[in-house]
Amino acid sequence: MTKKIALVSACLLGLKTRYDGKELTHKKVLALQDEYLLIPVCPEQLGGLSTPRNPSEIREEKVFDCEGKDVTSFFEKGALSVLKIAQLIKPNLIIFKERSPSCGVKEIADGTFSGRKIPGQGVSTRFLAKYFNVISEEDL
Ligand code: SF4
């Protein structure tokens, strides 16, 4: 049986790509491997940010790290890279990490670094959701 293809936030597959150098392996995502070829992508790394890195949040359509540096260009470069990968491999499904400033699907932080969340999408999700079916690990 030919497997379907899923593009997945790399941290959900156990890669230590998060800003704090940790991963967030998600059992329900891993369990899809019988049915899907799971392809990891990390937009923030593809955009040129190092790991570990400062946490970032979206504020007024731009992305700032916790020291106030505008990192929007890194996030957009990463989103464009992931979009190009998706256009090449044409995934049946995209599973992104909820609440990330890149990968959030329904919720993101409110931009104040206070821990508060608001409805919204990460930068990569915004790029990809125009063309592909994007869900979060919480939708599984
Ligand atoms: Fe995971 Fe996405 Fe953050 Fe990369 S950018 S660490 S894939 S949530």
Image (tube, rainbow, N blue to C red):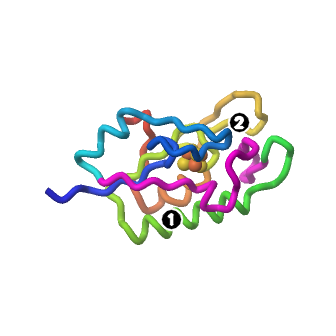
* Residue at the extreme top of the image, as rendered: 115
Q: Nearer the viewer, residue 123 or 31?
A: 31
Q: Position of residue 4 (x, y in %)?
A: 26, 56
Q: Is residue 121 visible?
A: no
Tell me the quarter of the image containing the C terminus. Answer: top left
* Residue at the extreme right of the image, as rendered: 68
Q: Which mark is residue 110?
A: 2
The amino acid beneath tag 2 is Asp
Question: Which residue is disc 1 drawn over?
Answer: 83
Residue count near mark 1 (Cα–Cα under 10 Å), binned few <14, some 14–19, many ≥20: many
Q: Is residue 46 magenta?
A: yes
Q: How many marks?
A: 2
Residue stretch rendered in magenta on the structure? 37-64
The amino acid beneath tag 1 is Leu
Q: Is residue 17 left or right of residue 28?
A: right
Q: Position of residue 127 (x, y in %)?
A: 55, 60
Q: For mark 2, give the secondary structure.
A: loop
> Mark 2 or mark 1: which comes first in sequence?
1
- Above or below 126: residue 11: above
Q: For mark 1, give the secondary structure.
A: helix
Q: Is residue 70 left or right of residue 32?
A: right
Q: Position of residue 31 (x, y in %)?
A: 30, 38
Q: Which mark is residue 105?
A: none
Q: Nearer the viewer, residue 55 or 131?
A: 55
- Above or below 39: residue 58: above
Q: Is residue 55 visible?
A: yes
Measured in 3D between alpha carbons, the distance from the residue under mark 2 to the one under mark 1, in whole angstroms, is 25 Å
Residue at left offset 43%, top offset 64%: 86
**CB of mark 1 near ligand 1 (< 8 Å):** no
